[in-house]
Amino acid sequence: MSANTSRKRTDSEDKIAQGEQRTSPPRAPFGKKQLPSIPKNAVPITKPVSPAPSAQSSNGTHASYGPFYLEYSLLAEFTLVIKQKLPGIYVQPSYRSALMWFGVIFIRHGLYQDGVFKFTVYIPDNYPDGDCPVSIVVSTCFVFYSEGSYVCTTVHFIMRSCFNWRRNHNHIWQVLMYARTIFYKINTVEPLNPEAAVLYDKDVQLFKSKVVDSVKLCNSHLFDPPKIDDPYAISFSPWNPAVHEEARERMFAHKRRPEDLKGLQVSGLSWVKPGSTLPFSKEENSLQT
Amino acid sequence: MASAIAEGTQDRQPLSLNGVDPETCMIVFQNHWAQVVKILDKHDPVRSGGGTGVLRYGPIPGDEASAVQNYVEHMLFLLMEEGCGQAGAMGPILEFVVTENVMEKLFLWSLRRQFTDDMKLEQLRMYEMLVGGSRQPLLHHKPVLRPLMTLLSSCSGTTAPAVEAQLVLLLHQLCSILGHDPSVLELFFHASEDQGAANFLIFSLLIPFIHREGAVGRQARDALLCIMALSAENCVVAEHIAENTYFCPVLATGLSGLYSSLPTKLEGRGEDWHRLEYTDWRSLPALVQFLNSLEFCNAVIKVAHPSIRSQLVSYIYNGFLLALFGLWNLTFEEVMTTTAYLELFLRSVMEPALLQTFLSFILLHQHENVHILDTLVSRINTPFQLGTVSLGLFRTLTGLYCEDVMLQLILRYLVPCSHMMPSQRRVLREGDYYSVSAARFLSLIPACCLPKPRPLHTPPLDCILWSKGADGEALSEEHCMEFSCIIGPEVSMDVDYLQYLYDARDSVSHSIRACRVWSAPYDGYDPPPELFQSCPPEDGLGSPPRRTQGSHLVSANDKVNHLELEWDDSFDAVPCPGESEELQTNRPSVPAEPPKHIQEMKRSALMLIRGSYVEESEFQDDVMVYSLVAQKDAQDVVDRSEWKRQGMEPATSSPEKGAPQGQSPPSRPGEDLISQYEELIGALGVESGSPTKSQSGFRRTISPAEEDEVDFSSFSADTPEAEKTPSPEGSRSRQGSNVQAAPFTGPFISVLLSRLENMLENSLHVNLLLTDILAQLATYPQPLLRCFLLNTNMVLQPSVRSLYQVLASLKTQINQRVSARPDFEVLVAEAQRYLQAREEALRSHGEYLLENMPALPRIPPQARNAAFATVIYSEFLKELAAIAQEHSIQSHLPFNE
């Protein structure tokens, strides 16, 4: 999981897109260079890029650091997502932009049980400022758009819930968590999809069967190639032992992290007894002085 | 393997017995032996007619001796080449050797030949060849082993170098056989029982060679290590070594011996020298030898049985560390040398148990009631190179990621959380998600150092890795002005900042991983702040800074230490004007004599006050110090204010002897320096009330500009009260602010920050070290430390100085320089160019050589340090900002996982 956090990119310059709505997917910029992972003598930015119109740019002097702040804010958010270990939710930033994350959510019980929904998180380039910094578009379920927008409804809920976004208090993982609960807990107050809400209130059985149909339909498109062409876009393929078996074994083998780290063990030292604040308080190290 | 028994053998060695019938070999062997016996018998006193001994028959003729020699060589060759018999039985030749007692007879023969060194050599070579070359195990047979042991014991105490070398070679061989075949161990252990001599002869024989230099010593230590490794699995061996041999004492006291032969002064080091590099010590044979022995101790502790390990560790502590570093009444120069040695030893010692010994000595041992650590900290602020070398030592110490060290140095002062506002404890748990602190650090970068669009005529340059100092550690720094990448027509992006981010990523993650073994997260909750506040720590350790007046002696002493150790700080730590007065009047003073040791340090520091040299009796004969003074005088203009601060503390003994004449223009002969500085303190109190100061809100030393205006003669010596003792006023204010009221972040932080505050006057090398240490500290993941250093949002107690405050005050100082000197920006650019060239030189030559360094830039000497410091300052800001950013993604969550 942490592999993604160690990747660095120049932060995105998707800001080129003029007049685009916040919620719309940014155009994948072309010719974007990824930073080499080895830092020596890197001159990474070769392409003219317009800087983020961040607050700092107005005073002129420190505009050049703005992109770094944005990048690190996003990295911090992403690290938080990883650390939360959200049940059934997996997220990975895109290759091309730190402002776009690919995700997938597995619904493990409830009405939408067995549903597997891919989604994309779009973060506006003025993050963390602005009202609603994050929007989520569920991309798998194009079917739902025509059929009754059950999932679409939930997506809009997410956005609305975030209108009171407060920087430092709200984090992207909370948005994801909220997205998850919506699949488990249907809320028909102020629905964005009145049809679905009415159906839920009046005829739960029908609602349920429609949901099941949608989930099935959705899952039947699971192996479709991702709509956004990005090396890090999430794609599914049928189980193929030649490809997957080894990876799977490695995943299980890596359960025990401490052993894994032994090779890299850096020599920190401590002779402090836990609970003590005296140096050399561990008993086994009593010195004969 | 078959190194020749004698020179002649080598020609015959190639002959191969492949395919030769074993029976033929046996017959040849027997025939040779028959010839040998004939000669042997001829000279046997018993057989040849019962004389009383060899002497009667006179010397054995040379031709007979060499005949025997030739036969024996052939025989040994046959013996070596013989394979095992069936089912591991002896081969026929070996059986013959055993039954005929061939080896013993040969040994007797050489005894009969007066057993000169040549005889010994011959015998030793014979066994070396057999032991190393034989295809079947020989040592299991007593008729082979016994003469060998007798030979060995007869060689003990030999002095001939050739014999020693051969003896050690053989012992080494035997030890490596022991390592492979533990069953032989039993044999060796009991072989000498018959003689009633000490058990385990081969071990005892090696001990005298422990500290030997050269190949012999190396081989002996190697052999001993084999046995040490053996001891880890064999308790009998371990017990024997620990209880019946002098191995550990010899090893430890040998260290003392070698240490005492080290040079007490290291001369000819450049001004920037701060620690002993390989290039320094490889040219000092005594030091090389010492390090070899230290390395051996290290290796022994690593592989040996715990009982040996603990014995050795304790001998090293008591026999070496206490004996040698306990000597503190040294000259300045010697103290510096000792410090450099200590640093080198800390770097050389890898084994945790041994490192623990050194560290516990530094952290826990008290000399005249002062912890060694506190003494070392106080030296950071001393003039000359001692301060620089001390900084080097602390860089090594802080680089160990040792909880105990960090606890004593810093964390125990932060754990009570008294340095911050009570409400701020929760901030410790928060992450800096939006790089707020980084932005604040970066916003301090002075305008003259900001990245600017590159002028067209400047050729584009790659990012430059700029390692700090001469130690080869690649800490990258970069120049901000000319090497920024231009993105778009008008916006430039500071590309080298990326480099800092990469480095910060490495250092922070390294630090986080290293600190996983620590006992607590130090996050303001664990260990709980109350722990320090409530329970009085044992033996004066970890004493809380705010403790109420101690009732017992130790705590009183401790308090004194804090008080005294902050003497450097008392000057600039005068809090906001109003408060300081309050403190002065309200706080009762604790009359306390500073520990003698601190007085000494202070006194030596006092020697240099505006170029005057106050001589103390111990230094009377120290020509070295004089020359240092003279050397320093030449450039003291710049360093003046630093020394001044050394002198701020009123010493309890007044310098009666006065200054050596002729080299102190500003101070008048006989002038009482102490009273001058008493006055200065007063003057500063006034200063700190000035509008600029209160406006900025930072407590700081007088800025360079102001300093220039300070007329020292105005604080003339007519103040009567400062004749002999410090003014009660002064000490009261110190105690008030440091011990009782003001939360204290510890002497180490305090001394680092006050040296940092003086950055513009510090030499380049001091600044490199200083910023290096602080950056290193900033990578530590413990929230208490990280937030104190990096979180610019955290609200600290008003009297606590933060790193950010010091940095901000530096920016003010730099701005003042800029406005005072129109060409300052040009000078800074010069300095930048120089530092880059210097860096390139360092990189391409791999080591610091004066001749490779670029020529110093054309910066007037009085502005040089400030120009360099300005460059370092802005690079340091980037470094800190990068570290803060990395923390935000690597360690902003509490200790979990």
Image (cartoon, rainbow, N blue to C red):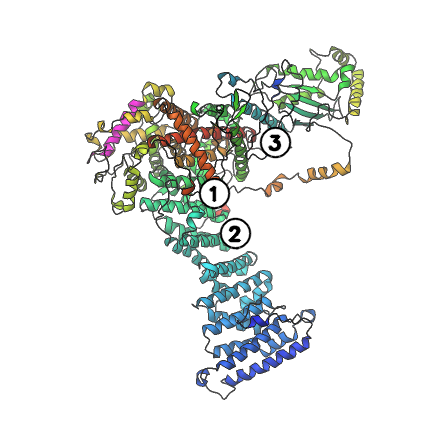
Magenta span contains residue B584: no
Decide if residue B645 is in sight here: no
Residue B365 appears left or right of B75: left
Location of mark 1 (residue): B845
Q: Label 2 sits on what residue type?
A: Lys
Outermost bottom residue: B49
**Mark 1 → mark 2, Cα distance in angstroms:** 35 Å
* Residue A85 % position (x, y): 64, 29
**Mark 1 → mark 3, Cα distance in angstroms:** 33 Å
Stretch of the chain drawn in magenta: B660-687
Decide if residue B703 is in sight here: yes
Q: Secondary structure at mark 1?
A: helix
Location of mark 2 (residue): B302
Q: Are marks 1 and 2 in contact (CB under 8 Å)?
A: no
Q: Are marks 1 and 2 on the same chain?
A: yes
Q: Nearer the viewer, residue B672 or A60?
A: A60
Instruction: State which chain disc 1 sits on.
Output: B
Residue B742 vertical placement versus B279 (above, below): above
Q: Give the position of the N terminus of chain B as an image quadrant.
A: bottom right
Q: Nearer the viewer, residue A67 or B89?
A: A67
Outermost front residue: B457
Q: Label 3 sits on what residue type?
A: Arg
Q: Earlier in the sequence, mark 1 or mark 2?
A: 2
In the image, which is nearer the foreground, mark 1 or mark 2? 1
Q: Tell me, for residue A7, which label it has, or none.
A: 3
Q: Give the position of the C terminus of chain B as an image quadrant.
A: top right
Instruction: State which chain disc 2 sits on.
Output: B
Q: Secondary structure at mark 3?
A: loop
